[in-house]
């Protein structure tokens, strides 16, 4: 596997990387998501090699929602993490925004030894307005430290719902609340990448 094969972009740190972070996008997005770019910049500034990459469905077509098999997208995440292991020593952190975070969390559940930490942004707990349709059946199988970065006005799940759902995860969990933010995690007052990276580094320790 190469960076080109996962449609990845690397944010290089100064000096030898402390580890590698691999992040992917939400259902309608791509590796060019402004949020992913800012988070990868923050990781690189902290001395980590950060990769943002396209899921397999996005490599097949430039726009539109996920198409084909979610299992195929999860295979793409496994490939990205395997590539990360070859690029630097140190821990490997993986995650993503919304759909990308959900798929990565399923990979963490299916392959408990693959990651050192899971970092998810705006986890899509349920479709907006349908709180009974939870997407959490795999949470009990997640054993790695997990950081949720979540807006308090996210229609895909409230902070209370995220807290409740996260109790099923057997590894340590940290929830970073972004006050007032919706699903895109936009905030005029809080530095979302800094808060998320701080929490992930603390959870790794």
Image (cartoon, rainbow, N blue to C red):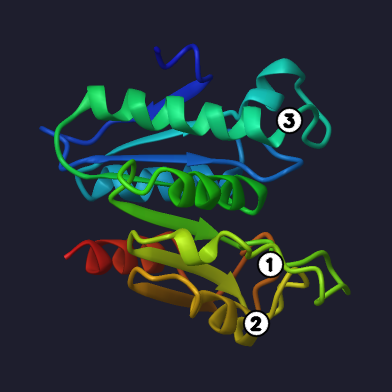
Q: Residue at x 34, y 68 (%)?
A: 171
Give whichever of discs 1 and 3 has the lower sequence position.
Answer: 3
Q: Which residue is drawn at 33% across and 72% down?
A: 172
Residue 162, how many percent across, how many down? 59, 77
Mark 1–mark 2 Cα distance, whole angstroms, equals 8 Å
Mark 1–mark 3 Cα distance, whole angstroms, equals 20 Å
Q: In which quarter of the image is the N terminus?
A: top left
Rendered position, 89 above or below 156: above
Q: Quadrant of the C terminus?
A: bottom left
Give whichever of discs 1 and 2 has the lower sequence position.
Answer: 1
**Does dot 3 land on a helix, a strand or a loop?**
loop
Residue furthest to the bottom in view is 160
In depth, the one of 72 and 182 nearer the eye is 72
Count neighbours of disc 1 (C-alpha within 10 A) and say few if under 14, some if 14 to 19, many if 20 or more.
Answer: many
Mark 3–mark 2 Cα distance, whole angstroms, equals 27 Å
**Does dot 1 land on a helix, a strand or a loop?**
loop
Rendered position, 164 above or below 135: below
Count neighbours of disc 3 (C-alpha within 10 A) and say few if under 14, some if 14 to 19, many if 20 or more.
Answer: few
Q: In this view, does 13 lie to the left or right of 43?
A: left
Rendered position, 205 above or below 97: below
Asked if disc 1 and disc 2 are in contact, CB closer than 8 Å, the reply is: yes
Q: In this view, does 203 lie to the left or right of 59?
A: left
Instruction: Kindly identify which numbered label has been placed on residue 125.
Output: 1
- Kindly report which numbered mark, 3 or 2, lies closer to the viewer in this rendering: 3
Rendered position, 96 above or below 205: above
Q: Give the residue pinned by disc 2.
A: 161
Count neighbours of disc 2 (C-alpha within 10 A) and say few if under 14, some if 14 to 19, many if 20 or more.
Answer: some
Instruction: Kindly identify which numbered label has been placed on residue 20.
Output: none
Q: Give the residue pinned by disc 3.
A: 69
Q: In this view, does 98 lie to the left or right of 119?
A: right
């Amino acid at each position: 596997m190469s960076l080109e094969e996962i449609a990845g972009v690397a944010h290089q740190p100064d000096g030898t990387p402390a580890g590698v972070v691999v992040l992917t996008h939400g259902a309608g997005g791509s590796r060019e998501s402004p949020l992913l770019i800012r988070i990868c910049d923050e990781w690189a500034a902290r001395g980590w090699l950060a990769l943002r990459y396209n899921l397999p469905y996005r490599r097949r077509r430039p726009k539109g929602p996920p198409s084909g098999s979610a299992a195929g997208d999860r295979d793409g995440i496994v490939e990205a993490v395997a590539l990360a292991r070859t690029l630097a020593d140190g821990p490997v952190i993986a995650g993503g925004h919304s759909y990308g975070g959900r798929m990565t969390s399923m990979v963490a559940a299916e392959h408990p030894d693959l990651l050192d930490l899971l970092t998810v942004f705006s986890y899509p707990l349920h479709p907006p307005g349908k709180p009974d349709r939870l997407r959490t059946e795999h949470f009990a199988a997640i054993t790695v430290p997990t950081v949720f970065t979540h807006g308090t006005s996210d229609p895909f799940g409230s902070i209370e719902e995220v807290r409740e759902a996260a109790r099923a995860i057997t590894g340590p969990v940290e929830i970073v609340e972004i006050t007032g933010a919706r699903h895109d995690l936009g905030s005029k007052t809080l530095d979302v990448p800094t808060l998320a990276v701080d929490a992930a580094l603390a959870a790794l320790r």
